[in-house]
Amino acid sequence: MDERDPQELAGELEQEGEKLESHSSELEDRVKEARQDWQRKRADESVPGALPPRDEDGEGKPPG
């Protein structure tokens, strides 16, 4: 069984939590950037494979 000082362990866990929170924020920023990039590509008809969003009735714009 681990007999480390509870204060030391609490400090280490707090640091780990802060590190994970930082990574989470960075990942959230990257996801937002990727989403914005994809939306720009979908709006640009010259980007192959980036189909425009479908209308409310489920129909997209016809190609060409």
Image: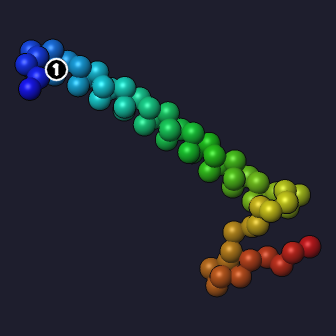
**Which quadrant, please, contains the N terminus?**
top left
Colouring scheme applied when the structure was drawn:
rainbow
Q: Quadrant of the C terminus?
A: bottom right
The 10 Å Cα crowd at callout 1, few under 14, some 14 to 19, many 20 or more, is: few
**Residue occupied by mark 1:** 9
Residue 33 image offset from top left, x and y in percent: 62, 42
Q: Is residue 33 above or below residue 16?
A: below
Disc 1 is placed on an element classified as helix
Residue sitting at the far front: 1
Q: Nearer the viewer, residue 63 or 17?
A: 17
Disc tally is: 1
Identify which residue is drawn at 49% across, 41% down: 28
Q: Position of residue 40 (x, y in %)?
A: 73, 52
| Residue 25 against residue 50 in the figure, above or below | above
Task: Determine the residue positioned at 11% across, 17% down.
Answer: 4
In this picture, residue 4 sits left or right of residue 56: left
Residue 34 location (% of width, % of height): 63, 46
Hey, which residue is sitting farthest bottom in the picture?
57
Report the front residue among 31 and 57: 31
Q: Is residue 51 left or right of residue 33?
A: right
Write the residue at 69% across / 55% down: 39
Residue at the (69%, 69%) spot, across then down: 53
In front of the other: 13 or 25: 13
Residue 57 to residue 12: above or below: below
Q: Quadrant of residue 47?
A: bottom right
Q: Position of residue 54 (x, y in %)?
A: 68, 74
* Type of amino acid at the residue the image marks with label 1: Leu
Asked where in the image residue 8 lies, by quadrant, the reply is top left
**In the rendered view, does 12 fall on the left or right side of 36?**
left
